Image (tube, rainbow, N blue to C red):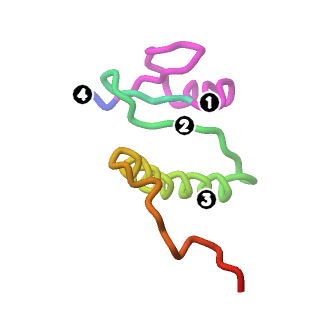
Amino acid sequence: MDGRAWIEAPIRPHKFIGPGRALAAVSKAGRVLVTANGRPKATMIPTSEGTFASDLELLDRVDLARPIAAIRSDAVTKGMERTHFPWRESTPR
């Protein structure tokens, strides 16, 4: 592989474009899927100096949500999503 990546965006799918045009695609499309050899490798989203920190925090939350979603999906597959958890019940005091 020569290190080049392809950009899939509504404007020119599966066409190699340089960094400047990739940034323009992000600005126009809102988000862009970057692929290599037809396989997804990255997602580009727009950001700015004003939103950079909050954008990174949002991406951190997405990364943390993935294992939780996997655990929940596994529980549904095993039929454990409705297991009785007494400590979750609210009891009048």
Q: Earlier in the sequence, mark 3 or mark 4?
A: 4
**Residue type of the residue flagged with mark 3:** Glu
> Which badge, 3 or 1, comes first in the chain's sequence?
1
Give me the residue at 45% from left, 30% from top.
34
Q: Percent position (x, y) of residue 49?
A: 71, 52
Per the model, the C-alpha gap separating discs 3 and 4 is 33 Å
Contact flag, marks 1 and 2 (Cβ < 8 Å):
yes
Going by the numbered disc 1, the residue's amino acid type is Val
Q: Quadrant of residue 38?
A: top left
Q: Which residues are magenta?
A: 4-31
Structural crowding at the residue carrying mark 1, measured as other residues with C-alpha within 10 Å and reported as few (<14), some (14–19) or many (≥20): some
Q: Nearer the viewer, residue 84 or 41?
A: 84
Residue at which label 3 appears: 57
Residue to which mark 1 is pinned: 26
Tell me the kind of residue under disc 2: Met
Marks 3, 4: nearer the viewer: 3
Q: Position of residue 18 (x, y in %)?
A: 49, 25
Question: Would you say 31 lies left or right of 78 here?
Answer: right
From the image, tell me which residue sits under label 4: 1
Q: Earlier in the sequence, mark 2 or mark 4?
A: 4
| Secondary structure found at label 3 | helix
Percent from the top left, x then y, of residue 12?
Answer: 54, 13
Q: Residue at x 49, y 21 (%)?
A: 8
How many numbered discs sit on the rendered protein?
Answer: 4
